[in-house]
Image (tube, rainbow, N blue to C red):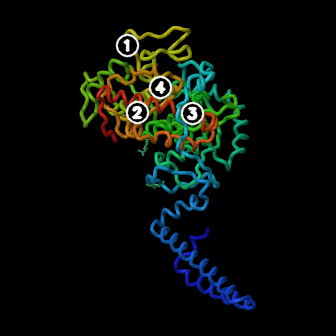
Amino acid sequence: MDTHTTRPGNVGNTLICLSVSFLKVCNCCSGYSAIRKYLIIAVVCFVYLFFTVHVSHTSTRQDKRPDLWTRNSVYSLKPRKTYQDPTGEEVNESLSPTRSNVVYITLKSKRHKPAIIRGTVRPKLRRKKVKVRPQGGTSQGKAKDARHDTNTADKHLGYSELDHSDYSSIRIYSERAPPWFSNDDIMAMRFLADGKITQIDEVAPPGFSSLILFKSATNHTDDADACRKCCGIVRRPLDMSEVFAFHLDRILGMNRTLPAVSRRFHSLGDGQPCPVVLWDPTLSPVVDQPSERLNWGSYQTALKYKCWHRGAIPKPEWSCTSIHHHEWSKLVVFDFLLQIYERLDKNCCGFKPRPEDTCVELGHHEECTDKDSIELTHIVHRRHDPHHLVFFNNKGYFDRDEENLDFKLLEGIKELPDQSVSVLKSQRLREKLLQSLFLDQLYWDSQGGRQGIEKLIDVIERRAKVLLTYINAHGIKVVPMNS
Ligand SMILES: *[C@@H]1O[C@H](CO)[C@@H](O)[C@H](O)[C@H]1NC(C)=O
Ligand SMILES: *[C@@H]1O[C@H](CO)[C@@H](O)[C@H](O)[C@H]1NC(C)=O
Ligand SMILES: *[C@@H]1O[C@H](CO)[C@@H](O)[C@H](O)[C@H]1NC(C)=O
């Protein structure tokens, strides 16, 4: 269909062409009877009329929405193979697609019965840990040690990069990425998935346990501080929920996680895809005072005083950290949906842990009696942006039963962010997650494709329902939290 070039202005030309062909028809058919001639004329007229009406109709339609037409040209030309953007929200068009052909996914799910996730997604390797060095000692020395280990790895990686130099595992078929991603997000995802790796080190930035970092810049330095948008953290294959967490964070409008994608390394993860997370050298753990650590008691006190809310300057007895009151509300929505307990409930006091949970050491469940003194961990912010949290270490648990959800995460919280809650209420969480996670082909495939992804979404949807019920039952206020 070439309606794009046939506009009403061309109708005159069409008419001339038709007249000429009509005359030709008359000449060559001069031997036919008059009835036959009239029949032919009638057919020609009908064909002509059909084209005029049809063309002017489609032309008017496209004239009314000129930009939509150009934007959607891919969809209109190949109507059966569409990458849908069901949201209709405003999007940035300056992206270039990573794929030229188009693929169709339906965002409406036909499934009625949510699957039971237990046992199907539980990572079998949870206890198997990547070799982690003990803390202490200078990070420099450790990094040098690690470099020694990974020198052989670099060779493998160099060759694996060549394999997909012009084929991104980030699938973007149209000029628009889903609107919940910023251009920086897309650039970071592409960098993490496809960036050429020059070096892999194990480093221990101040305040963090050791991390495996890949670098993409040629500056050979052991200093993680020198890594600005050119380094990625490689996590274990069984921490793959980091990728889901990133997409969920953006869909819920929080923007608190660092971009994460899955990537395969020849030398790491036993050939399984690993989650990789953009490293930000300005990250720093939040501490109460220089020496004091953040604990449950002071956190609960701080919640009561709504630290930094409406510009209030905290008093010493409020136990405030640098973190703005609303940040905790965002954190608990996120942590509750993914059942991340390592930040607010590291001893698993709010649920029944299983032997493979990190709070259980050698079958012994850590203390919950002196709960006020239990430390909060992985509470992180950026040094230049101290009031906002960064959700770092987002290992979620999809295989936790609904009767065993950790409600301790919600303790002390009286307000939740309206933007996130409205997404949870909207009935569109599933299609947004599907559309979003589809971008990361390696993640998508590693979870068993569409079927596996839908099972994960089932879990999140059920927890969202539980959270909405909790909000009603406890009179939690849902308020705007844009900062
Ligand atoms: C779209 O991206 C361009 C380039 O990154 C940026 O300058 C512009 O502000 C963006 N527009 C919107 C609406 O996000
Ligand atoms: C690499 O080193 C040069 C010189 O020290 C510096 O100017 C540049 O910003 C560095 N590049 C990166 C990506 O760190
Ligand atoms: C998301 O967070 C980053 C880091 O703080 C910030 O640079 C960016 O502007 C934020 N994006 C949006 C859309 O708020």
- N-term mark: 2 or 4: 4
For the residues labelled 1 and 2, the Cα–Cα distance comes to 23 Å
Q: Name the residue under label 3.
A: 233
Residues at marks 3 and 1 touching, judged by CB atoms closer than 8 Å: no
Looking at the image, residue 267 sits to the left or right of residue 373; the answer is right
Mark closer to the chain start, 2 or 3:
3
Q: Mark 4 sits on what residue? A: 340
Give the x, y percent position of residue 158: 71, 40
Q: Nearer the viewer, residue 299 or 116?
A: 116
Q: Earlier in the sequence, mark 1 or mark 4?
A: 4
Secondary element at image label 4: loop
Q: In this view, does 323 lie to the left or right of 216?
A: left
Q: What element carries label 1?
A: helix
Q: How far apart are marks 4 and 3 (CA)?
A: 19 Å
Which quadrant, please, contains the N terminus? bottom right
Q: Residue at x 60, y 25 (%)?
A: 120
- Residue depicted at x 39% and y 38%: 425
The residue drawn where x is 70% and y is 88% is 24
Q: Which mark is residue 389?
A: 2
Observer-side mark, 3 or 1, equals: 1
Q: Disc 1 marks which residue?
A: 371
